[in-house]
Image (spheres, helix red, strand yellow):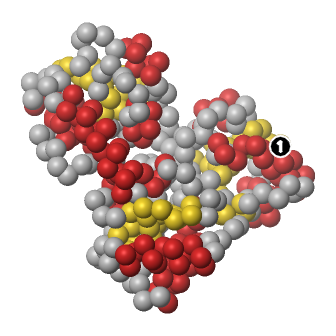
Amino acid sequence: MTLEIPYDFKIKELCQYLRIGKYSRILLQLPEGVKQYASIISREIENECRVEVIISGDPNWGACDIPVFEAKRIGANLIVHYGHYPYSYNPIHHELGVDVLYIPMEYKGGIPDEILSELEQLLREKNLSNPIVIATAQHLREAKRIVDELKKKGIDARVPEVLGGLPGLVIGCDYRAITQATGSNDSVIVISSGLFHALGAALATAKPVFQIDPYLMKVSSLDEERKNWLKKRYGVIYKALNATRWAIWVGALYGQTRLDYAKHIAGLIEKRGGSYLMVYSRYVTQREILSIDSRDIDAHIITSCPRIPIDDFTLIDFPKPVLTPGEAIMVLTNQLEPYRFPW
């Protein structure tokens, strides 16, 4: 590649996979922050692997968003999805004659010793000695190294095992590495960029959460973020306590169609004497919700993705409560503590 890109795209391994599978045309799916490199990556794949590459320009929301129908329409027999492992709740490997290959896109950089020293200091200031270390797909390898380094400093860190998932892996809607981790722990360390994954971790547990950002080269506590976001989310929850007429949104993306879960929530609504309507939509934004909203709806529940209410509706003044599935269950079962996230 002519431009140094900080991720390993496994081009050599990809070429071998393409030759074995005899693929002739692929649909290339990249994370939002990596699409700026799309022309470089696609040219290298075409030149090295001798295959036609078409780049997906649609938004890529994660491993739940696999464009099988789009690939089928353009005659691509393989989707190469960069940035994630297969979706933990509904892995898609082959649909409608289209295969899917996941490449996690490991980060080439590392976390310097001074950042680990800052982390150690934060842990010791709070008398914490038994953290679990979790990470996004790009940084799982670094999670294991951080555990080793912390152990050398006398801190009993570990990468958590989780039934049915990769050890230590976290995605925006799956925090079982925290909530179902085997063994005990007194804190959580998240290796990720931005606030997205770290905030989810802070909402999924009441234990102290620390983030290492490999790009900004800093370590920080999520205590204040958790406090501020929970205050806002409970404000939404309280507004929904007297709701009787609900709109339940079911996602149309391949990995976001949770009809059985939506029906479970519908049953809770009926048990309380309420009513509901079911809405099926590929995307759920303010526009879609406002277009359906009426005097006959008191509140909305988004079953497609629990991050939509959190990231898209928390910081705005929206006229109706928009709840995650976990929040809806809190309201419908009258169990407001502890906070339930994501499901």
Which residue sits at x=41%, y=28%? 316
Can residue 304 be seen in the rendering of this structure? no
The picture quadrant where one finds residue 244 is: top left
In the image, is residue 2 above or below residue 277? below
Q: Residue furthest top?
A: 295
Quarter placement of the N terminus: bottom right
In percent of width and height, residue 227 lies at 32, 50
Which residue sits at x=45%, y=77%? 121
The picture quadrant where one finds residue 266 is: top left
In the image, is residue 277 above or below residue 216? above
Which residue sits at x=30%, y=58%? 205
In percent of width and height, residue 18 lies at 76, 55
Circle 1 — which element? helix
Give the residue type that dot 1 points to. Answer: Ser
In percent of width and height, residue 173 lies at 42, 48
Which residue sits at x=65%, y=33%? 58
- Foreground: 214 or 41? 214
In percent of width and height, residue 309 lies at 38, 35
Q: Which residue is mark 1?
A: 39
Can residue 4 be seen in the rendering of this structure? yes
Horizontal side of residue 121 vs 163, given as left or right: right
The picture quadrant where one finds residue 125 is: bottom left
- Foreground: 127 or 181? 127
Horizontal side of residue 194 vs 321, given as left or right: right
